[in-house]
Amino acid sequence: MATGFPAVTGDVLTSNMFNGLVAFTLNAQTGATYTAVSTDQYQVLVTMNNASANAFKIPTNASVAFAVGTVITVMSIGAGTCTISAVTPGTTTVLSAGATAASPTLTQYKSAACIKTATDAWYVVGAIA
């Protein structure tokens, strides 16, 4: 996570914190499935690198209480297609303009931003199929 986030009232912005705002921290994933965690927000790029089909999962708010407005950036760098979906589809809604609105996919070298808009609602925008 970029240094300086999350900040709270009374925090003093240092040069290290400020300089950390311009760079992404990489969270390199190589497995078949990865579920987002609280440290994936802000200036983090989650890379999905697998030669086979793989999945990036968004947890329920009860599991990980991301703040509304949180953005998680995902990039598929492996040859396998990455599907973005909810861990619990009946609870968490994931919507996009992709071919399947509830399960957008990323092909190699494509990225997307997952944006939390309500307690268990996320929109996925970017280079989705």
Image: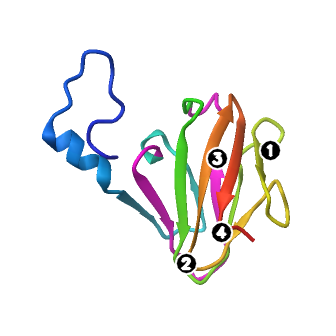
Instruction: Identify which amino acid the numbered label 3 is placed on.
Output: Ile
In percent of the image, x 23 and y 42: which residue is there?
18
Q: Which mark is first along the chain, 1 or 2? A: 1
Label 3 – label 4 distance at C-alpha: 18 Å
Tag 3 secondary structure? strand
| Residue position marked by numbered label 2 in the rendering | 109
User: Please, what is the three-letter code of the amino acid marked with disc 4?
Assistant: Ala
- Please name whichever residue, 59 or 95, is drawn nearer the observer in this view of the structure: 95
Q: Which residues are magenta?
A: 41-64
Q: Nearer the viewer, mark 2 or mark 3?
A: 2
Please report the residue visible at 67 percent of the width from the left and 56 percent of the height from the top: 125
Name which of mark 1 and mark 3 comes first in the sequence: 3
Name the mark on residue 127: 4
Horizontally, residue 38 falls left or right of residue 54, namely left
The three-letter code of the residue at mark 2 reads Tyr
Q: Position of residue 111 (x, y in %)?
A: 57, 67
In the image: residue 36, left or right of residue 104: left
Distance of label 2 from label 3 (alpha carbons): 20 Å
Residue 14 placement (x, y as % from top left): 15, 34
